[in-house]
Image (cartoon, coloured by chain):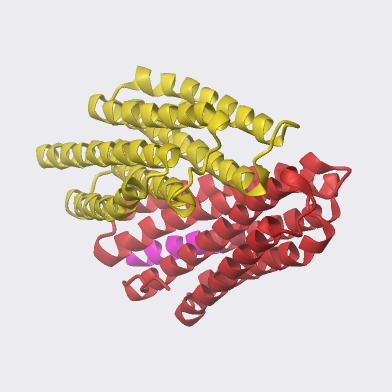
Chain colours: A yellow, B red
């Protein structure tokens, strides 16, 4: 009985890591579409999101089946419920990548991000992608150290967001209201991806240690 | 055994309705702070959020205790897991109200929303508050009809958000980049509150009927 439980749980965590890798691809391509104004790449992100949704449903069904058939209690129960929460957050990160891709598509044939802001926005995309990539390794390795470390990247994301606000609210801003609004929303989407990444990593800490890390 | 289950479940749903009413107050006060530039009201929203977080923890602990001690299966199991999801969404709606309050506070002694945009923004606040208020009644009455009806208010919210974009991206916009960025983010926050309200209502439909409604 317990062996079946751990086998099914392993398959759930393997699925979570797989979804996380799909999210990583979505973040990567959405940022590429955004910085190059490439409608075809933006479409790919938007249409691939359905696969993340399906993978989420699969994880949910497996988790329900574990809960029903294995009736885990105490720590084991909390691990399965944590997996359900992780998959919700990963799906949301996919949705946020779609939001980024949709802003890119809306501005085609132009590029939504004015040239001098591209370094900051590219950096936000890189940090987000790196965080998501680390989360999939954290899930696979149940790596508590790496999960705690992830909070520091989140600080970098917050700094980048503040920097982008300084740029677009500064006196030198010459790109008008539309570009400023796009950038404010893009900053919000990347920040949320990073927040969810930290939250998923924290759930791994919880799964391994039984405690959530203090908020960093 | 089953009686204890239904009693505990009822207490969870009563708690969910209570949290929903706290969120309703948060949305109401955040909108008031926003439209009047009242720092004291904004502070109240921000500091009251900890109570929503605590109430969320209480619901989670009760749900875990039900899962551990009653070991529900099939439909009963899905109801308890739905409650866990509803409480996450309600907590998030509280956070989004805090985001609105923080924009209000940031612009004191000014009012973040320029005068001619206030009607649209006031309407977004009203629609959000009304939706949250209906959700608490939907939870109390397990009212499937009212839950399905809620999707229509969400359409009104989407229209309001499009209207606010038309206003701030139009040629008549004279309030600069900062106000436009504030409004774009505020629109996003209210829209997310409405999305979560619909999602919580949909979970009530699921709890009652065993099926999620088709996306409206």
Taking the image as shown, residue A198 lies to the left or right of residue B35, namely: left
Q: Residue at x 32, y 55 (%)?
A: B70
Relative height, residue A132 to residue A155 (above, below): below
Taking the image as shown, residue B50 lies to the left or right of residue A23, namely: right
Percent position of residue B165, x then y: 64, 59
Q: Is residue B76 visible?
A: yes
- Report the residue that reaches farthest toward the bottom: B145
Q: Residue at x 36, y 19 (%)?
A: A146
Percent position of residue B121, x then y: 72, 62
Q: Residue at x 41, y 38 (%)?
A: A36
Nearer the observer, B19 or A157: A157
Relative height, residue B134 to residue B70 (above, below): below
Nearer the observer, B38 or B180: B180
**B10 drawn magenta:** yes
Q: Quadrant of residue B116?
A: bottom right
Taking the image as shown, residue B139 lies to the left or right of residue B170, namely: left
- Report the residue that reaches farthest toward the front: A109
Nearer the observer, B95 or A97: A97
Percent position of residue A207, x then y: 33, 32
Magenta span dominant secondary structure = helix
Q: Is residue A211 visible?
A: no
Percent position of residue A176, x then y: 67, 45
Quadrant location, the N terminus of chain A: top left
- Report the residue that reaches farthest toward the right: B109
Range shown magenta:
B1-14
């Amino acid at each position: 009985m317990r062996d079946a439980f751990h086998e099914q749980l392993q398959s759930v965590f393997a699925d979570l890591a797989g979804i996380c890798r799909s999210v990583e691809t979505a973040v990567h391509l959405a940022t590429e579409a955004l910085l190059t104004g490439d409608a075809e790449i933006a479409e790919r992100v938007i249409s691939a999101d359905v696969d993340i949704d399906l993978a989420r449903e699969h994880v949910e069904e497996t988790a329900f089946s574990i809960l029903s058939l294995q009736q885990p209690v105490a720590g084991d129960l909390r691990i399965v419920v944590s997996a359900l929460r992780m998959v919700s957050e990963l799906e949301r990160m996919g949705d946020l990548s779609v939001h980024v891709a949709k802003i890119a598509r809306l501005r085609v044939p132009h590029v939504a991000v004015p040239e001098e802001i591209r370094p900051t926005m590219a950096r936000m995309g890189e940090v987000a992608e790196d965080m998501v990539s680390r989360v999939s390794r954290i899930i696979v390795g149940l790596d508590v150290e790496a999960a705690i470390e992830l909070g520091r990247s989140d600080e970098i994301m917050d700094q980048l967001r503040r920097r982008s606000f300084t740029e677009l609210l500064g006196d030198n801003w010459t790109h008008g209201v539309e570009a400023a609004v796009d950038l404010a929303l893009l900053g919000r989407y990347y920040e949320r991806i990073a927040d969810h990444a930290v939250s998923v990593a924290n759930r791994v800490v919880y799964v391994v240690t039984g405690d959530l890390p203090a908020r960093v």
